[in-house]
Amino acid sequence: DIQMTQSPSSLSASVGDRVTITCRASQSFSSYFNWYQQKPGKAPKLLIYGVSSLQSGVPSRFSGSRSGTDFILTISSLQPEDFATYYCQQNFRDPWTFGQGTKVEV
Amino acid sequence: EVQLVESGGGLEQPGRSLRLSCTISGFIFGDYAMTWVRQAPGKGLEWVGFIKSKSYGGTTEYAASVKGRFIISRDDSKNIAYLQMNSLKAEDTAVYYCSRVLSSSYVIDYWGQGTLVTVSS
C-alpha cells in the first residue's frame, strides 16, 4: 500500500498568513494526487486534483505542487473560512489512501 | 445540481448486517464510478471501496479491512449505489460517505453528507 504521511498534524495561523501543508508518499508517482478540505460536521470538499489542478469554484489562493515524493498544498493568504482540516489522498494505486489530516486553527 | 444522499445508517449489533443506500441526482449516474469513504468518530478518512461504471466493466475494489465482508453494488436504473455491510465489527463504527468518482481520472469530486453507522451490543 502507498502510505501518505502528512505534516504537520495541526498548525496555528492567522488571517493573511501563508500556509503550507506537506504530504510525503511512500512510493514515487507523478499524478493521481488530490487535496480535500473538511469543516466540522461536513463532508470533505475537493480543492486540488491531479497534484496542481484547481477544482472549479475553489479560490485561487489554494495551490498544489510536487517535489519528488512530497506533495504540497499552499494557501497564499489564509482567510477566516479556511480554518478547517485538510487531507491529502492518492488514487494512483489501490487501496486509495489518505493522509492523517492537518487541522488549521487560529 | 449534483446531489448524493446516503441512507440506511443506524445502530447495529456486532456480527449483523446493514445496507447503506446512496441516491443521486443532478448527473448521469451511469457515467461515473462511485466510492464509499468512512470516518470513525474524531478520526481521519478511510477509503472503503469503489465500483466502476458499467462502461469501464462495473468492477469493484475494496480496502483490506472490509474485503470479504462488504459489497458495493449499483443500480443504474434507479440511480442508487449500495454498500452491503456484513459481519459488522465495532471498528466499523463511522460516518459513511458516498462519493462520485470521475471515471477517467478516479478523482472523488462530490461527496454526500454522510450517514452514521454505530456497531455496538
Image (spheres, coloured by chain):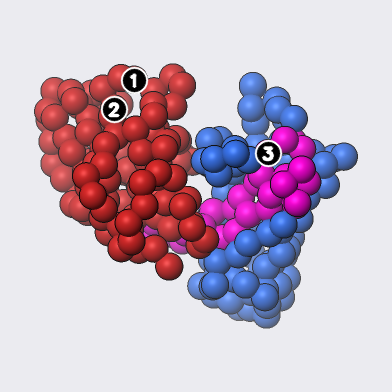
**What residue do we see at 49% from left, 58% from top?**
A93
Report if residue B45 lies within the magenta region.
yes
Question: Which contiguous range is marked in magenta?
Answer: B29-58
Q: Is residue B80 visible?
A: no
Residue A50: x and y in percent read 41, 37
Contact, CB < 8 Å: mark 2 with mark 1? yes
Q: Do the residues marked 2 and 3 share a common chain? A: no
Measure how far apart labels 2 and 3 are at the Cα level: 26 Å
Answer above or below: position of B84 versus A60.
Answer: below
Residue B113's quadrant in the figure?
Answer: top right
Which chain: blue?
A: B
Mark 3, residue position: B32
Visual hue assigned to chain A: red
The residue pinned by badge 2 equals A62
Q: Residue at x 26, y 42 (%)?
A: A66
Instruction: Bin the neighbour count of mark 3 within 10 Å (Cα to Cα): few under 14, some 14-19, many 20 and up.
Output: many
| Element under disc 1 | loop
Q: B25 or A83, which is in the foreground?
A: B25
Marks 2, 3: nearer the viewer: 3
Identity of the residue drawn at 67% across and 75% down: B68
Q: Residues within 10 Å of mark 1 (few under 14, many from 20)?
A: few
Kind of residue sitting beneath label 3 = Tyr
> In the rendered image, which quarter is residue B20 located in?
bottom right
Residue B42 coordinates in the image, percent (x, y)? 38, 57
Q: Amino acid at mark 1?
A: Pro
Label 3 marks which chain's residue? B
Circle 1 chain: A
